[in-house]
Image: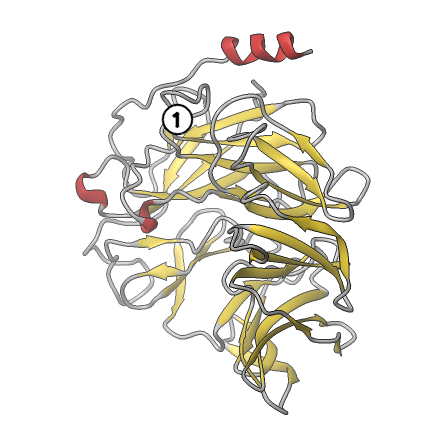
């Protein structure tokens, strides 16, 4: 088996990044390596934004790989990092025509509801609520007093459960950092999880809504560790004590419906590979043979069994995937769909591609400068996959 996998890695070709001209705004091109249709969905800096009384800024992109950009029915697409006015741009989810903008949001963080297209969930101060983005109206679901404050979803890397029912809120209670699970349907708050750790990176609900996942420097000063808890705050399994096994991961469901984390391993024996790790017991399965992965996204909630992986790590010594986005199958078969070249030169955080798929997994969005000098402008690009497995 080992010899067969090594042979597969050698057989797979590393596609070098050709200096292809940046696509014109909303004019699709064909990726010559993998056949996907690629569209630049952001305009040139200083040019008018259609249907909105403003102009495009030199940075117009999404938030992060783990944050969905399309809404539940894919009728809307949110670009949440427009460094101009308005700061939030809502586009048609299919044509990418700008529809409307919002310069303020109702809370400190927002997330698309996975099943209700017009709704986003927000948290603010000590409140949780729904935001209707089309009508720009809010509905408060929970207003917690008694010392609660500074609510976030993560911060920045938390999500809702796949059914949209459960969320984990991070914040403070009487000045101490806490997190708790909350059932949006039943309007039920679970017990506070108190933690005294050196550094919290993020905390989130799992895809099923059954577990709380905490990531950060939890024990011994080691970064990028993970501990899983049940909804009442009891530890589930052992601490994932190694630094980044996995890292930059997202949470999803395995074929049996069990909760898993999927991302790049940062340590041996699977350094650079995409791995999945079962939440209930920490069991690891390696999913890729080659490359050195960066960010993973499982926002393809309606295409189960896959995750989408960004490869932006310098690729000369980590063939075959380099400067591209792929879909990785979760069944351990080492099946990889190579979707598109990123043409993304990473010069700072904003030029990180951080690819994220649509709910049906048929399209994937990433950010990048497309070979621009000094990494500006940063725009958003979408590839429509053709489903080739290599």
Q: Is 280 placed left or right of 268 in the picture?
A: right
Name the one closer to the observer, 138 or 76: 138
Q: Is residue 5 left or right of residue 56?
A: right
How many circles with numbers are drawn on the protein? 1
Relative to 101, 85 lies left or right: left
* Image quadrant occupied by the N terminus: top right
Residue 113 lies, in percent from the top left, at: 62, 62
Q: Is residue 130 visible?
A: no
Query: Tag 1: Cα neighbours inside 10 Å, few (<14), some, or many (≥20)?
Result: some
Secondary structure type for disc 1: strand
Please state which of residues 126 and 97 is positioned toward the viewer in this rendering: 126
Which residue is pictured at 61% across the width and 78% down the height? 128
Which of the 4 image quadrants contains residue 328? top right
Instruction: Look at the picture and state if 123 lies above or below 254.
Output: below
Residue 204 position by quadrant = bottom right
* Left or right position of 31 against 276: left
376 or 199: nearer the viewer: 199
Q: Quadrant of residue 181?
A: bottom right
> Where residue 241 appears, x then y in whole percent?
62, 47
In the depicted structure, whether residue 114 falls above or below residue 8: below
How is this picture coloured?
A: secondary structure
Residue 77, position in %: x, y?
48, 55
Q: Quadrant of the C terminus?
A: top right
Q: Residue furthest right?
A: 256
Residue ranking furthest to the front: 220
Q: Where in the figure is residue 95, as x and y percent of width and height? A: 44, 47
User: Disc 1 marks which residue?
Assistant: 30
Residue 232 in sight from this viewpoint: yes
Q: Compared to 127, does 49 lie above or below?
A: above
Residue shown at 31% from the left, 40% from the top = 346
Residue at (72% x, 29% y) in the render = 331
């Amino acid at each position: 088996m080992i010899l067969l996998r090594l042979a597969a890695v050698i057989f797979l070709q590393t596609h070098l990044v050709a200096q292809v001209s940046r696509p014109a705004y909303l004019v699709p091109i064909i990726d010559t390596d993998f056949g996907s249709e690629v569209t630049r969905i952001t305009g040139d800096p200083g040019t008018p934004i259609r249907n909105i009384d403003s102009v495009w800024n030199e940075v117009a992109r999404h938030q992060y790989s783990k944050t969905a950009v399309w809404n539940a029915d894919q009728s809307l697409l949110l670009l949440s990092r427009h460094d101009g006015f308005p700061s939030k741009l809502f586009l048609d989810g299919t044509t990418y025509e700008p529809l409307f903008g919002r310069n303020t949001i109702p809370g400190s963080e927002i997330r698309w509801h996975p099943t209700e297209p017009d709704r986003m969930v927000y948290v603010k101060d000590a409140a949780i609520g729904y935001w209707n983005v089309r009508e720009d109206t809010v509905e408060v679901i929970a207003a917690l007093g008694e010392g609660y404050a500074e609510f976030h979803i993560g911060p920045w890397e938390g999500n809702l459960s796949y059914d949209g029912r459960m969320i984990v809120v991070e914040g403070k209670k009487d000045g101490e950092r806490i997190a708790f699970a909350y059932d949006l349907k039943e309007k039920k708050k679970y017990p506070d999880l108190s933690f005294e750790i050196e550094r919290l990176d993020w905390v989130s609900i799992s895809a099923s809504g059954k577990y709380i996942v905490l990531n950060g420097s939890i024990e011994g000063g080691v970064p990028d560790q993970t501990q899983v808890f049940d909804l009442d705050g009891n530890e589930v399994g052992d601490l994932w004590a190694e630094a980044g096994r996995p890292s930059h991961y997202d949470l999803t469901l395995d074929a049996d419906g069990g909760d898993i984390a999927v991302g790049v391993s940062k340590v041996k024996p699977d350094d650079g590979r995409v791995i999945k790790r079962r939440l209930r017991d920490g069991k690891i399965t390696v999913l890729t043979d080659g490359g050195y992965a960066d960010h993973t996204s499982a926002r393809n909630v309606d295409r189960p069994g896959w995750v989408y992986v960004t490869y932006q790590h310098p690729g000369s010594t980590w063939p075959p995937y380099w400067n591209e986005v792929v879909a990785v199958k979760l069944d351990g078969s080492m099946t990889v769909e190579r979707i598109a070249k990123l043409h993304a030169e990473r010069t700072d955080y904003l030029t990180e591609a951080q690819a994220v798929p649509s709910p049906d997994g048929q399209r994937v969005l990433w950010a990048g400068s497309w070979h621009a000098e000094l990494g500006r402008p940063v725009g958003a690009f979408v590839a429509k996959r053709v489903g080739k497995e290599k």
